[in-house]
């Protein structure tokens, strides 16, 4: 009897300890880490020999809500990094009334050269769905009940009026710091809106004398078909968001999901595609790929664990 009673007590203490640890982890994820914004600084050896460094600020997945003043102030302060180019990979907001806060957050960045693509939550506000869906091969909800349409056309007009380049399934060119960059982008592959623009169109910066210093691909969701198309297009650097870095990660292991068909080891950070990074063994034929873990979450899952919200300063240097 004593042995059985002792075993039951040990089991109860263990269960209690696990419950306490789970509650502490949830409190950390929902109250601390989800607002613990961080700047990632990465160096990418991708420029032609002899060129000076070029700084790209990558913003993604703000999922901004009214009242998130701390996030707004933090994003505004990133302008002090003095980037040459700002790249916004979508999912800017998550509420019909977020336009004023979003424009205030991006105001200092809109004064600089920039480029943008759309994510699914730029078009429609998020809806509640069972978090277990993210463990499925395809987490998308087949039918979106009563979608709340966001004013993305107005937002796009504001971006374009400020001089940012719209890369919605198109190509363009931007000149920054005495360099000429060709850009190619797609609409959101998560909604099957991506149509990779063919080469040779009039807005293809690699036609004519071909005098470009860098070819950059921009997309929201890094689906394999888009990354393959960019690799085939000889993109030097591909930039994406969408994954939230997995949002909930296992320390020492990493992301469990990416919410697309990208493998989890590329859920965030600097990688190569389709092979290893170009500066590592076996990566000579790969394209540089940066995936941002982004700055926000769905309002229905406002937690992050072992995956801090982030923006990234990519410093491009001579390879």
Image: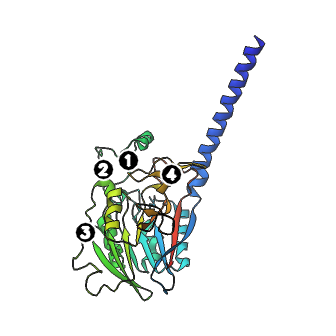
Tag 1 secondary structure: loop
Question: What mark, if any, has residue 13 been given in the picture?
Answer: none
Identify the residue position indicated by label 4 in the image.
Answer: 247
Residue name at image x 48 percent, y 65 percent: 277
Q: Residues within 10 Å of mark 4 (few under 14, many from 20)?
A: many
Identify the residue position indicated by label 1 in the image.
Answer: 127
> In the rendered image, which quarter is residue 167 located in?
bottom left
> In the rendered image, which quarter is residue 77 located in?
bottom right
Q: In whole angstroms, how far apart are the C-alphas of marks 4 and 1?
A: 17 Å
Q: In whole angstroms, how far apart are the C-alphas of marks 3 and 1?
A: 31 Å
Tag 4 secondary structure: loop
- Measured as percent of width and height from the top left, residue 171 is found at 29, 74
Q: Residues within 10 Å of mark 3 (few under 14, many from 20)?
A: some
Mark 4 or mark 1, which has the lower sequence index?
A: 1
Identify the residue position indicated by label 2 in the image.
Answer: 147
Between circles 3 and 2, the one closer to the viewer is: 3
């Amino acid at each position: 009897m004593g042995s059985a009673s002792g075993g039951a007590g040990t089991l109860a203490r263990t269960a209690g300890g696990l419950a306490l640890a789970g509650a502490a982890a949830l409190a950390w994820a929902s109250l601390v880490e989800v607002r613990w914004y961080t700047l990632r600084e990465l160096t990418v050896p991708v420029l032609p020999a002899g060129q000076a460094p070029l700084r790209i600020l990558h913003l993604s997945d703000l999922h901004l809500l009214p009242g998130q003043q701390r996030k707004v102030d933090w994003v505004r302060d990133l302008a002090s990094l003095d980037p040459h180019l700002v790249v916004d990979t979508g999912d800017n907001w998550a509420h019909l009334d977020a336009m004023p806060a979003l424009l205030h957050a991006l105001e200092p960045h809109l004064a600089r050269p920039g480029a943008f693509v759309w994510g699914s939550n730029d078009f429609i506000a998020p809806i509640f769905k069972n978090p277990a869906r993210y463990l499925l091969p395809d987490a998308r909800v087949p039918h979106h009940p009563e979608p709340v349409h966001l004013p993305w056309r107005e937002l796009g007009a504001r971006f374009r009026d400020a001089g940012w380049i719209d890369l919605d399934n198109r190509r363009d060119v931007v000149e920054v710091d005495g360099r000429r960059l060709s850009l190619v982008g797609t609409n959101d592959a998560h909604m099957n809106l991506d149509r990779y623009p063919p080469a040779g169109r009039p807005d293809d910066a690699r036609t004519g004398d071909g005098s470009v210093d860098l070819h950059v691909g921009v997309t929201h969701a890094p689906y394999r078909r888009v990354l393959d198309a960019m690799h085939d297009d000889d993109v030097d650097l591909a930039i994406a968001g969408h994954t939230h870095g997995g949002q909930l990660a296992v320390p020492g292991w990493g992301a469990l999901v990416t919410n697309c068909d990208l493998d989890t080891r590329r859920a965030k950070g600097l990688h190569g595609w389709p092979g290893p990074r170009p500066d590592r063994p076996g990566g000579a034929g790969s394209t540089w790929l940066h995936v941002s873990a982004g700055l926000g979450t769905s309002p229905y899952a406002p937690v992050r664990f072992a995956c801090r919200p982030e923006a990234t300063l990519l410093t491009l240097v001579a390879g």
